[in-house]
């Protein structure tokens, strides 16, 4: 059967006269797909005059960028950002600098940065796949698969502005540079430019995230395997430019660390050790070459020196402590992202997070090893090591599924074109062809340039579209569903908006304006209310304990929160079923702080001030409360004080119950209003000032 998917190397029409499309146009469409998959929640991100970032952690980076711009001059990193993720914060601050801190413009920059990072990463994946395979179709398929890999798509979606998207760029750039250098025999100007790019990539990786060694460590086994290929091949040593790039990158990162204080020392030292190890590997290869030794000699030497290196690293307390801390990180429990990709739903969970790329990539791993060894193309080993490394990390913690995605997409791109060729829809991918089969190559030999792709006939186009739909459709759907779970829902937005307006109208200072809420949304509330989104630690330590404590312990919690918390936000908890009325959660959220039948007396320091239209969120202001004291008959009995209260979003009856001792009751109320005392005890008027000042009101007989 004639193949209509060929691309002429000279740019002339093919014998069948098929239509053609420029490769750069096809790449632009693939990158457009990257953008579109990450925009389903645009309306939830840009609300009125607010940029409402998705999830919780992005507000930390927005806060740090604001802090870097707080003086209005050139960005200056806050202390909190100098170690950890300094390069990310500096990049965001510089990009947001023209707009100023805390503005809509700075929020716009932070919201769009993940999408820009995704486009850059996809372009780098295209370059790596094309350079590795010599087939632009695989490059395009890889970029397309990355576009719809859910684990990557939701981490780089509009408004999901945490460190992951930034890390992906440096990770892909590092892989591309290494693959390019290992494929180049010439020591020309371009080779050294690529080596410079590798230096920038590894330095950027080290300065971008405090756990950067996890992302750099695949280079060690990757280069060790590449050396086993290199020693079997005559000609210039291709490891030299790679080593030069790593050494230069380590020097650059160390210089920044020493001059600006950026990043933890252990992270910089880890890169130094990687660079030093690469120098040792290069020397080892040179020595074995001089002795006319075989690759088996090198493999044995690598194993011996690898053990020595591990033992030596453990002798340095700083690095040993960091290594132990890193290992313990993988066994701790916590947020859902700390569970593995298959922790909840097994293989289905893997498919949901990694998409169709994982199905195509898995069988390509042994082929990659075969091609790398038989064809003396060490780039395949580098790709395989990256894939296995991040595959293991993703199996432990799903947060690393996004790091796996670029490499799974490249292998998946090979698998996609190979699968299409099995159905006779396209010509076999370049890595699959026999070396002599080059007469009618589907791509130019170098995989680049101004080559045209030939559009096949309608039948093949339809079948290819169906195959692509399987690969693209499910991933896009899963990515959109995950994005929907990350966006800030209407109830949270309404509550944050109302508290922000209240704080502005009443000039409530921080920390009296601090909002205590579910820790997974705590930064959202506090960023918009008071601009402080550095940590959710206080909420994580106290919020759940507070809600599920005894309903009569409100006064104790008020003493804990006094001077530290200004507002408490409660929420519906349908997944927990009915909450016992003896818990503060039920007292506040279900009864607005009122007493209940039995011995539950209600709360006197948590004043309901707002409820969303659907009642899903309720806001309480911490107040001293007014204390009412008066006579009552019958020791051991109780007295009910009742007042009608109206707040934005709700009208309710506020009830406090007070015990009677020696013919006297005493109770603190949180709401102003006219209180009825018992069935026939008269009324008492409690004003706003009384509640705010903590006044005592005594009722005479």
Image (spheres, rainbow, N blue to C red):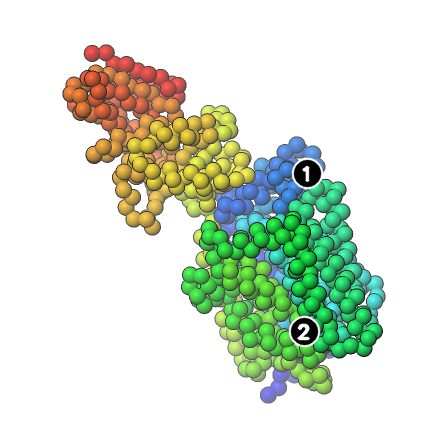
Front residue of 425/276: it is 276
**Is residue 395 depicted above or below 73 in this figure?**
below
Q: Residue at x 25, y 22 (%)?
A: 675
Q: Is residue 160 visible?
A: yes
Position of residue 523 measured from the top left corner of the image (x, y, whole percent): 50, 41
Q: Residue at x 68, y 47 (%)?
A: 265
Residue at the spot 74% in from the left edge and 62% down from the top edge: 278
Quadrant, the N terminus: bottom right
On the image, the x and y values in percent for residue 533 come to: 53, 38
Q: Residue furthest bottom?
A: 1
Question: What residue does disc 1 label?
Answer: 75
Q: Quadrant of residue 608?
A: top left
- Which mark, residue 484? none
Under circle 2, the secondary element is: helix
Q: Is residue 505 visible?
A: no
Where the C terminus falls, by quadrant?
top left
Label 1 packing within 10 angstroms: few (<14), some (14-19), many (20+) = many
Q: Horizontally, is 627 left or right of 92 in the view? A: left
Helix or strand or loop: what does disc 1 sit on? Answer: loop
Task: Report the Cα–Cα distance between label 1 and label 2.
Answer: 42 Å
The mark found on residue 133 in the picture is 2
Category of crowding for the residue at label 2, using alpha-carbon neighbours closer than 10 angstroms: few (below 14), some (14–19), many (at least 20): many
**Left/right of residue 372 with respect to residue 349 in the rendered view:** right
In this view, 701 is above or below 551: above
Q: Tell me where residue 86 sits by quadrant.
A: top right
Residue 169: image location, x then y, percent: 64, 56
Image height of 390 relative to 337, above or below: below
Sequence order check, earlier mark of 1 and 2? 1
């Amino acid at each position: 059967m004639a193949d209509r998917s060929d691309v002429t190397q000279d740019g002339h029409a093919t014998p069948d006269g098929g239509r053609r499309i420029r490769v750069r146009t096809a790449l632009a469409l693939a990158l457009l797909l990257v953008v579109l998959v990450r925009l389903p929640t645009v309306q939830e991100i840009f609300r009125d005059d607010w940029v409402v970032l998705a999830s919780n952690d992005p507000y930390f980076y927005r806060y740090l960028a604001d802090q870097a711009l707080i003086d209005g001059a050139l960005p200056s990193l806050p202390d909190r950002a100098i170690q950890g993720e300094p390069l990310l914060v500096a990049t965001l601050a510089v990009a947001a600098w023209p707009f100023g801190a805390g503005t809509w413009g700075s929020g716009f920059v932070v919201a769009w940065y993940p999408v820009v990072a995704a486009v850059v990463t996809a372009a780098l994946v295209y370059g790596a796949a094309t350079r590795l395979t010599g087939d632009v179709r695989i490059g395009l398929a890889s970029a397309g698969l990355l576009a719809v890999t859910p684990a990557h798509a939701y981490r780089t979606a509009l408004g999901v502005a945490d460190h992951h998207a930034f890390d992906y760029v440096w990770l892909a750039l590092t892989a591309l540079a290494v693959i390019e250098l290992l494929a180049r025999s010439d020591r020309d100007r371009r080779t050294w430019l690529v080596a410079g790019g590798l230096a920038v990539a590894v330095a950027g990786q080290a300065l971008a995230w405090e756990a950067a060694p996890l992302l750099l460590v695949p280079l060690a086994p990757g280069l060790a395997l590449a050396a086993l290929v290199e020693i079997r091949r005559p000609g210039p040593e291709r490891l030299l430019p790679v080593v030069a790039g790593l050494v230069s990158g380590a020097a650059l990162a160390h210089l920044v660390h020493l001059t600006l204080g950026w990043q933890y020392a252990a992270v910089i030292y880890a890169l130094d050790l990687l660079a030093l190890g690469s120098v040792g590997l290069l020397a080892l290869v040179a020595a074995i070459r001089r002795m006319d030794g075989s690759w088996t000699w090198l493999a044995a030497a690598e194993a011996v020196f690898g053990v020595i290196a591990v033992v030596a690293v453990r002798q340095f307390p700083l690095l040993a402590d960091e290594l132990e801390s890193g290992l313990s990180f993988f066994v701790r429990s916590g947020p859902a992202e700390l569970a593995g990709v298959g922790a909840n739903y097994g293989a289905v969970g893997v498919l949901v997070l990694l998409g169709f790329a994982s199905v195509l990539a898995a069988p390509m791993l042994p082929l990659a090893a075969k091609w790398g060894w038989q064809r003396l193309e060490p780039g395949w080993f580098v790709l395989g090591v990256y894939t296995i490394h991040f595959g293991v990390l993703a199996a432990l913690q799903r947060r690393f599924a996004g790091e796996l995605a670029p490499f799974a997409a490249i292998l998946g791109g090979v698998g996609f074109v190979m699968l299409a060729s099995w159905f006779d829809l396209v010509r076999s991918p370049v890595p699959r062809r026999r070396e002599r089969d080059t007469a009618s190559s589907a791509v130019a030999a170098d995989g680049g340039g101004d080559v045209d792709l030939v559009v096949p006939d309608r039948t093949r186009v339809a079948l290819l579209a169906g195959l692509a739909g399987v690969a693209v459709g499910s991933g896009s759907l899963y990515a959109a569903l995950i994005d929907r779970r990350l966006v800030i829902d209407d109830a949270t937005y309404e509550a944050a908006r109302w508290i922000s307006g209240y704080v502005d109208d009443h000039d409530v200072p921080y920390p009296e304006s601090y909002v205590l809420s579910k820790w997974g949304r705590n930064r959202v509330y506090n960023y918009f209310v008071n601009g402080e989104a550095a940590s959710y630690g206080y909420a994580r330590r106290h919020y759940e304990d507070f809600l599920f404590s005894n309903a009569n312990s409100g006064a104790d919690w008020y003493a804990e929160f006094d001077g530290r918390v200004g507002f408490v936000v409660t929420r519906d908890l349908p997944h927990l079923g009915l909450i016992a009325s003896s818990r503060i959660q039920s007292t506040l959220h279900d009864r607005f702080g009122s007493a209940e039948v039995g011995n539950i007396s209600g709360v006197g320091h948590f004043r309901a001030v707002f409820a969303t239209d659907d009642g899903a969120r309720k806001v309480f202001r911490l107040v001293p409360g007014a204390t009412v004291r008066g006579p009552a008959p019958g020791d051991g009995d109780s007295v009910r004080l009742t007042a009608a209260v109206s707040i934005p979003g709700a009208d309710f009856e506020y009830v406090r119950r007070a015990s009677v001792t020696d013919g006297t009751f005493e109770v603190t109320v949180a709401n102003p209003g006219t209180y009825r005392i018992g069935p026939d005890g008269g009324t008492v008027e409690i004003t706003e000032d009384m509640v705010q000042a903590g006044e005592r009101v005594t009722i005479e007989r």
